[in-house]
Image (cartoon, rainbow, N blue to C red):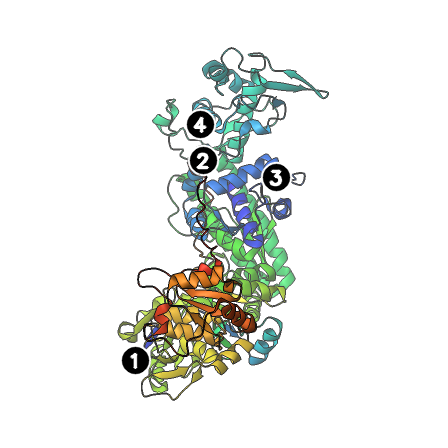
Amino acid sequence: MLTPSPLQIDLLRWLHLIRQRHPKLLKSGFPGRRDFAPLQKLLYSSQHIEEARLLDDHPYLLFLYEIAYQLDLFQEIDGHLYVHPTHAHTFFSSPLEAQQEHILQAYLRLVLWNEMRFVETVTVQRDDAAPHPFPAQVQIQARRLLLEKLLGWLEFPLQLHDIFQLVREEEPDLLQLSARFASQPYASLWIAEPPNKQRPALHPRDWTSIEGAFVQQVLSALGWLGLLKPRRFEHEPFRRQGLSSSSPSSSTLSSSSTLPSINTTPEQSAHSAHSAHIAHSAHSAHSAHIAHSAHSVHSAHSANIAHSANIAHSANIAHSAQSAQSAHSDVSFHTPTLLVQPNLDIIVFPSPSATRVLYQLEHFCQPTGGEQVLQYRLEKKTFFQALRNGYPYSQILRLLEEESRIPLHSTLRQQLDSWYQQSSQIVISRQGVVIETSDADEMNALIEEFSEIPHYILDPRHLFVPAHALPLLKQLGAYHQAQHLHYDQPPVRSLHIDKELHIRLDPQQADLFAETFLKKYATPLLEQRKDQLFHITQDSLLQAQQQGFSTQDLLRFLEQRAQIFPSTARLRLEALTQQIGPVYAGQVPVLFAQDERTMDRLLYEGGLGAYALRIGPQAALLDPSHQDKINQILDNLGITFAPQVPTAWPPRLSSLLLPAQTTPTTAATKPPPKPKQPRTP
Amino acid sequence: MIRFHWNLTLLQFASPKLAEEIDAQCPIVPLSQRTFHPTSHLIDDQHAESLAQTLVERGYSPRVESASPSASTPRTSLKPQT
């Protein structure tokens, strides 16, 4: 039976960590140590990441991160990582073969994970101007080429030096160093030699240290992918795990740039034997565990569980036998994957649908380890976290009931119900629908139709239907005749505003928030037969301000909902909220002259400019605090005040402010024209 | 006339006492767009996650219900442009 590879489980664990911590991305673009360190306890594969200070310090961490990244399993929102629910769900729900194919394709695209970066014995010393010896593109090409070759060579187990020999014969310039650096392919490379010494690399003498190291890194990665079984010791050969040779075409591979699709034939691979072993061990461990757990609960029930386990065990053995006989055929019936025990421990059996179940399980359970079989535990913390993330309780129960090989024990069910009740103290129900009726009678009639639909009655005219029940709404007769308002779209323009800031609200058009909002800022007036009337006054605005309601929110509200928002009404609102004003109107003397030139002369030659502000060609405001000085100047000049507006002047003095075709000047601030100087010969 | 108001977020408390207790610690009134009862408030969905987080920090265990679990729209794709 095909089972998830350690890498697939580690991908699930990485998402588990993201779901729990929402790691923050640092400047490096990776999560920090604080966020990735807990992965040590979660990883299924035996990796030691304790020493890693940065995520990209550790080959497997970076490999895992970038595989998940290439598969789009997570996303960045506001500098934090979040699981991409739709991509992750689709990926882990697809058949295992398809997942492994996607992972392999992702591996071939890896850019951040550069094989030569983790070869500690080779260092690069080059000028900034010189090209890098191991650019990502070349690594990707070399990776693909080598994988194609390995598909053919590893029909039979090979030792590492055999693989080196084959690569050296067929692809000696695998990393394109000779092609790119001509006569000195290793010019910028140094080889570390113990103790603490380095020497320049020599071509081709150091081929094994450079190209050979690359080959070793690729073999390690293929091991992580579950395609090869590499060993650390050279005397143990590499074996193919999942690489297929079943089809004639795959056994005679060409070196084309595109990879053939990688099929998996479990019955021919060691992987299959391994899976069978795991299955067998799981059952043994499972039975022992059951007996133990059951004993700890109570004996009467333990007999029942042991019996169920035996049945499940027998069924699984039969199934395994059947699988062995027809390994290619798909599983024609659904075999439950879980053993959900009364003590809240869960054992996961190998299954073709394991990743789909594991993906769900990781939402609300804590991984607790397991070497032969995966083990989880239903914990209050992860259970609550799942509910907080919007994972429905009904889905938790459905998964456990459908996937458990024994019926859920009543104590477990009680425990989950108890947690659920605790979490029901505060519920945030998103993406739901409020249904509004005209009156209580209409609501009562509607509620009768709602016998099968979960809902909460909010008041005699409103009820709320949570998001998970929305598909049922379309079955209602009322659904098709009702008016539908969508709150992810701009609100309906349901307000009529006049210049006095009287606001008429049409309740048949208005959204649910309009009336509540208006009551914060406006005084309700008499309710008319159809509409509601409000008035925004200085007092009502003052009250709103005292309660901390912002004028900007009011302006935005009116702009969004008013059919027409008259500019005078806006001006009034701004004046009432003191965004404009105050203004002052006082008695200030204005000096008018008979023409523009006379005014020029009075201001600039007569000296009035120091006490006057010109407001037009023939008009200037006089500073009342210097009235005596002004009188003195005018007196000295011999100018008299006319007792009334001379009859020759225009009847409206304001017309003196603006000449017919010119704009008002600011001549008071303009220097007087200089008198023309006679030219000296 | 029946009206369906779609895409709304409801905050509910099990009792008025609990609502009052929580309101004292993290005021609900400014978040409430419409209050039907001291235990039932329509709130702006933008505040849902931060409110849930605040409640967790205060020692409560809110439950969040939605159409699809954690089905938020991706705002940024991390996938490198090739």
Can you say whether A504 is above or below A362 in the image?
below
> How many C-alpha atoms fall within 10 Å of the one at disc 1: few (<14), some, or many (≥20)?
few
> Would residue A25 be seen by someone viewing this image from the given angle?
yes
Q: Secondary structure at mark 1?
A: loop
Which label number is shown at residue A46?
3
Q: Position of residue A113 (x, y in %)?
A: 53, 33
Q: Which residue is mark 4?
A: A144
Q: If you read the primary sequence from the N terminus, does the residue marked by circle 4 or circle 2 appear first?
A: 2
Q: Which residue is mark 1?
A: B1
Q: What is the chain letter for disc 2?
A: A
Q: Secondary structure at mark 3?
A: loop
Closer to the camera: disc 2 or disc 3?
A: 2
Q: Which residue is mark 2?
A: A104
- Mark 2–mark 3 distance (CA, rounded to whole Å): 21 Å
Q: Secondary structure at mark 2?
A: helix
- The amino acid at mark 4 is Arg
